[in-house]
Image (cartoon, rainbow, N blue to C red):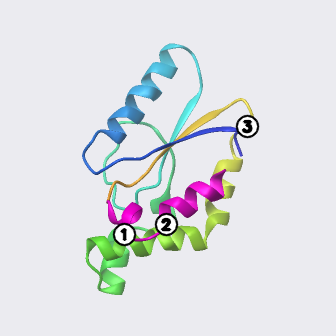
Amino acid sequence: MPPHAQLVMGPAGVGKSTYCQAMQEHAATEKHQLHVANLDPAAEDFKYQVAFDVRELITLEDVMEEMELGPNGGLIYCMEYLLENLEWLKDALDRYGDDEYIILDCPGQIELYSHVPVMRTLTDTLQ
């Protein structure tokens, strides 16, 4: 796993993905390698090059359909599923070396931060 990673968190719509795109573009102009990974199972479009995507593991759309959950409950389910399958995340991060930097673009739904310990647990695990 790379020793340097950044979790980009904040409410929906504040520009997390835009920040990730700007950082990736800036790194490219400076000839630095910077990877951006998507940890939002509800994300659809990216303006940055995606290193890996949690939707390879689970998608909000599939969960909503199969579990008959709404978007908020479905997102909580997806993120709890990620925590139960942290080996997938570890394997994805292990593809990057000690000299590489990765940004993790996180979901913005407030329930993940205020109602359940999912994001706190993920942060603690990554440390």
Residue furthest right in the image:
98
The image's mark for residue 97 is 3
- Among the 4 quarters of the image, the one containing residue 35: top right
Label 3 packing within 10 angstroms: few (<14), some (14-19), many (20+): few
**In the figure, 60 relative to 8: above or below?**
below
Q: Does dot 1 land on a helix, a strand or a loop?
A: helix
Of the numbered discs 1 and 2, the one sitting upstream in the chain is 1
At label 1, counting other C-alpha atoms closer than 10 Å, the crowd grade (few under 14, some 14-19, many 20 or more) is many
Q: Amino acid at mark 3?
A: Gly
Of the pair 118 and 1, the residue shown nearer to us: 118
Give how far across and how far down residue 20 sits, in percent: 41, 35
Q: Residue at x 43, y 51 (%)?
A: 106
Question: Residue 118, labelled with which disc?
Answer: 2
What residue does disc 1 label?
Answer: 75
User: x%, y% of residue 69?
Assistant: 30, 82
The residue range painted magenta reads 110-127
Residue type at mark 1 is Leu
The kind of residue on which mark 2 rests is: Val
Residue 67 image offset from top left, x and y in percent:
35, 85
Count the labels in the image: 3
Quote the CA–CA distance across marks 2 and 3: 27 Å
Q: Could you say which is closer to the camera, residue 85 or residue 47?
A: 85
How far apart marks 1 and 2 lie (CA) works out to: 11 Å
SS of the residue at dot 2? helix
Q: Position of residue 32 (x, y in %)?
A: 59, 20
Q: Is residue 121 magenta?
A: yes
Mark 1 or mark 3, earlier in chain: 1
Q: Main secondary structure of the magenta part?
A: helix
Give yes or no for contact between labels 1 and 2 (Cβ–Cβ under 8 Å).
Answer: no
Residue 64 as seen in the image, left or right of residue 34: left
Residue drawn 73% across the image and 37% down it: 97
